[in-house]
Image: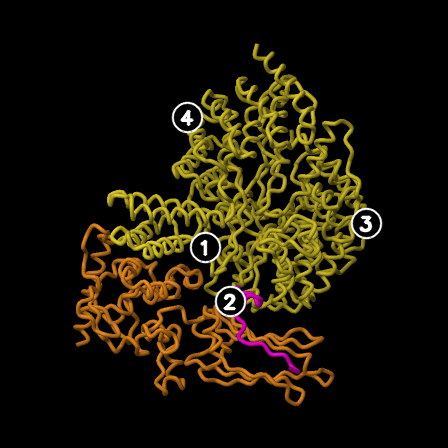
Amino acid sequence: VKRRAVAAAALALLGAACRSSRGPSTDADDGPPVHARIDLPSLAACGPCHPRQYDEWAASLHHRAWTNANVREATNDFAQEECRCCHSPLPVLQHSLTERPLFRAFLQDDGVHCLSCHGRDDGVAAARTVPDAPCRPRRDERLLQAELCQPCHEPTHQAFTEYRQSAAFTDGVRCADCHMPEREDGSGRSHGPHGGLDAAFVRKALRWQCAIVGGELVVTLRNRTGHRFPGEIPSRSFLLRIDIRGREPIRELLRRPFKGEARADNRLGPDEERVLRYPLGADLAAADVSVRLLFRPLPMTTEEDAFVLGEWRGGR
Amino acid sequence: MAAEVHLRCSIAIALFALAAPRATAPLDLDVGVPPGSPTGWARQIPVVTPRLHPWRAVTTRTPKGGTVASLPRKPVDRGLTGVGIFRITTPDVVGHLEWVNGPRTNGKAVTGGALASLPPVGAGLRWVGIAAFLRLLLHRQQVAEPEVVAHLLELGEPALWCAEAAADEPELQETAKDVLRRIDKGPRGSTPPAGASPREAMWLRFVGEELAAGHPFDPEGCFGRRLFLFAEEVEPLLVRWLQADADRFVVRNAAAALGRYHTTTAQAALLAAAATTHDDVVLMRALAALEPGCDADPLLKRLANTNDDVETAALTAALGRILATSAVPALLDRVRNRQDRDLLLTTLVALNRIAQPGDRSGMADWAETLCAAARSDPGRFRVHGPRSAADVPDQSTLRGETVEQLATCLRVRLGVAGAPRALSALLSERPAAHPAVPFANEPIRSFWPAAQIPLLEALPRLRQDEGQRLLAALVADASTDPILRVAALCELPAEIRDPIAEAQAAAESAPLELRLASLQLLERDDSATLGDLCRRLWRRVRAQARAIVSAPQRQLAVTALQAQPRLEAADVGELCTWLENIETEPPAKTADLVARIRDLAATLVDDVAEKLKPAQVDGRIEALVDEVIAVHLDRRFVPDTRKDTVDYVRGLLATVHRNRNDRAYLATVRRELADYFAPAARAMPREIEVAVIAPLEEEILFAIGRSRTPEATAALARQMTTRDPLRRAHACLAAAGGDRTLLLPLVHALLDEDGFVRLCASEALRHATGRDVAADWLYGALADRGAAAQEWFRIVAGAGR
C-alpha cells in the first residue's frame, strides 16, 4: 500500500513538474481542474473564490515561508537543501503525514500553498463535501488533526515532540484549536497569522505572577502552550526585565540558540512553571521594583518595540 | 598639480556582515575587527573627495617650458565601499546590549541631545561609532584602546551620540566619558574669516555653509559634494577656515575636508594644525591625513611634550604613516620606557611602515627580543580591560601572538637574515581561525587583524617569488576579505598585477571594492587595455537601458568613465542618449525605490486586467522583473532567479483578466504583487542599508563636455535647462570646455533661480573666456547680478563676433 502511495505521489509530482515546465497557465487557457492548480500561486488558484481565507493566509508566515528574510538568512538562501521541502511543500495529504513533504520546485515564492494543506488527488480537503463546487471539496477529518502539521514542524523544529509531552496532547487539544481558531461569526476557522507575530495571541501564551516574599522578588512564569515558549525558532525571544531602584536593570533572555551558538536552550517547556527569585535587600521598598515581560518576535526588535506581555510594579 | 582623488561610492552596505564564516562561528554576541589599526578605520568610509579629473582643462609644464594637457594620476585608496566598517556579526545585538539602542532616534537619523543643533546623523555613521565601542568591549586584546578613542575623535560630533549610548555600558563607561569630554573640550570660536574682496567674501561664506551642512564621515551624506567641484578654488579657503577662530564644528570639518587633498598646501596647513591645535578632533583629523614626505619635527616636538595616551597613539601612528625615519629613536625610547602594551602595538605597526634594510637604530635587536619574549610567554602581553561579553572571547595569548607577528614582519622589512623563514613558519604553523576575524582564511588566517596589513606589505620580501605567489593567491581567493584582496593586489609589481586587475575588474562576481581598485591600478599603471575594458563596463551599464541602475553598477561606471577620460564619438552619442532618458538623479534611498516599484506593480495589474492583450503580458512582466533586479531592492531578485520570478508573477496575474470586474480581487492582486517585490513596511529588519549617491550623471556630463562634439554641445545645452538644479550646475561646468555656442546659454544661467547654478555658470564663463565680471553670484542682490550678467552678455556677444 505504501509503495502505491509513493508511486501516486511521484506521479502527481511528475505531473506538476510537467505543468511547471510549460509555465503557469493564463486567462486564455483552461488548464487542469481547479483542485490541481498548484501550478498557480494561491492568489490565482484559490483567491478569486476564497478572498477571506486568502487574505488571512496572505498575512501569515505560511505565505512567507520561502521569502521571509529571517529564513533566508538562517538557511543561507536555502542552500541548506533539507529546509526547502517544508518551506515550499507539495500537498502533504498526497504524500505522508509522518515524513517530510516533497519539495515543490516551482512557484516557491508562494511558500506553504493553499493546496499544500488542502490538496488531495480527488479534490480538496475541506470541512464538508460540496459536490458542485469547482475545486471539489471533500470532507476530510485529517485537516484538523495535529498530525497534519507534523511533516513540517517535526523534526527540525521539534514542535510535535514537545506537543506530545504536553497537557494539550493528553487533553485532545489540537494545533488548529489555538492557531486556527473558529471565527466569531461562525464562518469557519481563521487562516490568519495566529502565531509569534500576533501580540494579542502571544499574550495568551503565558501566565505570570510577581510578588515580593521575604526580601525577594519572586516571578512565576507558566507556559500555557502545548510546546516550548518561545516556540520553534531562535529568532523569537522572551525577555524578562526587572528594574530595581539604584541597580542596573536585570534581564533574563529566554531563547532557543541559533545553530552553532554557544548558549543553552533556556525556554520554558510545555506547561512548565518556572519560579525565578531575585534578592532585593532590606533597604528597598516594594515600590522600588518593577517588572516587564516582553516578547521579541524578531531578532532586532528593540525592547521599546517588543510586545508587552505584562507589567508589574511593586507596592500597587 | 598634485594627484587628486575623486572617489565617490554608492553601495548598499549590509550592516550585519553575515558573509563572515558562519558554519563554525557562533552567532551570538560578537563583532568583527577590520584589518589594520583603528587609526585607519575612518579611511574605509566612502566619502566625497576632490575631483580627480577637474571639469576644466588641466595643463602641465613640459621640460622645454611649454604646456601640455595632462591628467593627474591618483594613488589607490583602500576602502572605496565601506565594506570594512560594518562588521557587527550578531543578528540580535540589541537584545544583548541595550545601550546599543542608545538615545532614541527620529526615524533613521539622530536629531536630538548633544547633536540637536547639528545636521542629523545617518544610521550608517551611527553604526560606525557603535561598532568601534563594540570592538573595544568584545575584543580588547585585538585593539589598542587609545587608537579606538582616536578613531572616535576623528569621527567628530557624531561620536557624541555613540559615546552617550556606550556610557550606559558599565565596562565602557570610562572610555565613553573620555570621548565625550574630549569632543566637548575644544575651543568655541565665533569669528568667521573675513574676505578681502566681495568675491572672496562670497566664496568664504559658501565654503563655511557647505562645511556646516553635514558630517564629513557620514557615508549616507554628501559632505563636500558641491565644495569639491571647485577643489582648487576652495583649498586656500579651507585653510582660512581651519586657522580661524570660528565655530568649531566648521573648523573641524575644514580639517576633514583638507584631509582629502593630497597637495602640499593642504599638507602644510594640516601639519601646522597638528602641531599647535588644542582641539582633539582637529588633531586626529589632521594627523590621519598626513602623508609620506611630511616634516616629522613638529610631530616629534608635540610627542615629546605630551603624556596623553590618545595623543601619543595618534602621533605615533601618524609618524609611521609619513614614513618618518627620524622618529625611530624617539618611538623606540618611548615604548621601551613606558611598558605600555597598547603603545607597543601602535608602535610596532608604525615601525613596520618606516623600517628599511640597513637600519642602525637597534630596531632589529629590539624586534628579535620581542619575538622571543612573545613566543616564550605570549600571555605576558595581555592587556587588562573590559570583561569581554563575547561568546568566544579573545584568548589570553592573542595580544602576544599579534606582537610576535608584527615583530617578525618588522624583522623581514629590516632585512634581517632568517626573518623571512620565520615569517613563512608563522604563516604555516597556526591555522587559528577565529570567529572574530571576518573572512578568515589561508594563508593569513593565523595573523590577527592588527598584523594583517603589515604582513601583506612584508610578503614581497620573502624569498624568490614566494611572497608574490601568496599575494596573487590572496587576490584570487573569493573567501578573503575584499579589503585584504585590494591590499594584496596593490603590493604586487605592475607586470604581475595588471593582468590580475584586468580580470578582476571585468569579473561580475568579484566584489565591488576589488573591481574599483583594479580599475584605479590599471589607470595608474597606464594599462594599454584600460580603454577597452572601460568601454565594456560602460556598455554593460547602458545595456540595462533603465532610469535606475544598481548602485554597484553606477559606481563601477563612474570609475570607468573617470579612468577613460577621452571618449570616442560613438561613446558620446551613447552617453547623451542615456543621460537624456533620465529625468532626475535616481533616488538613493530605499523608501523611494519601494514606492516606485509598488507603483509599477499596481500599474501592471491594472493594465493586465484592462488593456493588454495576452501576447503583451509576458513582455510587461519581464520588464518589471528586470526593473526590480536592476534596482537591487531585495537580494532575492537577481539574474539567476529571473525566470522563477517571471513565472511566479505570471502565475499571480493568471486570473486577473478573467476577474477584471471583481474590484476586491484586483485590489488584492495589486497589494500582493507590490508586497511581493517591495513590502511597504519591512517587517523583518534584518539589515540596515546605507545608500550613498554615485554621481554617474555628473560624471557623464563632464565626459560629454570633454568630448566637444556637436552632439555633446546640443545635449549640454538641453541639460542646462533641466529641472534638477544640481544637474543644471554640472551642465554649466561641463560646458566650460565645450563649444563656443554654449557661452550664451551660460550667460542665461547666470540668472538662474538657484545660487549654485549661477556660481557654476560664472565660473564656467571665467574659464571659457579668460575674462571675469565681479559679482556676488550666490548671495548678491538681483539688480547687481543682473548688471553683471548684462556685462557678460556684452563680452560673449563680442567674442561671438
Label 2 belongs to which residue? B26
Q: Residue placed at 60% from the left, 38% from the top? A: B225
Whether label 2 touches label 1, CB < 8 Å: no
Shade representing chain B: yellow
Q: Nearer the viewer, mark 2 or mark 3?
A: 2
The mark that comes first in sequence, 4 or 1, is 4
The mark that comes first in sequence, 4 or 3, is 3
- Measuring from the top left, give residue A169's x and y in whole percent: 36, 84
If the image is split into quadrants, where does the C terminus of chain B sit?
top right
Which dot marks residue B680? Answer: 1
Q: Read off the magenta span.
A: A296-316
Q: Secondary structure at mark 3?
A: helix
Label 4 belongs to which residue? B570
Q: Nearer the viewer, mark 1 or mark 3?
A: 1
Q: Secondary structure at mark 2?
A: loop
Who's orange, chain-wise?
A
**Prevailing SS of the magenta stretch:** loop
- Measuring from the top left, give residue B396's x and y in whole percent: 63, 67
Q: Nearer the viewer, residue B609 or B402?
A: B609
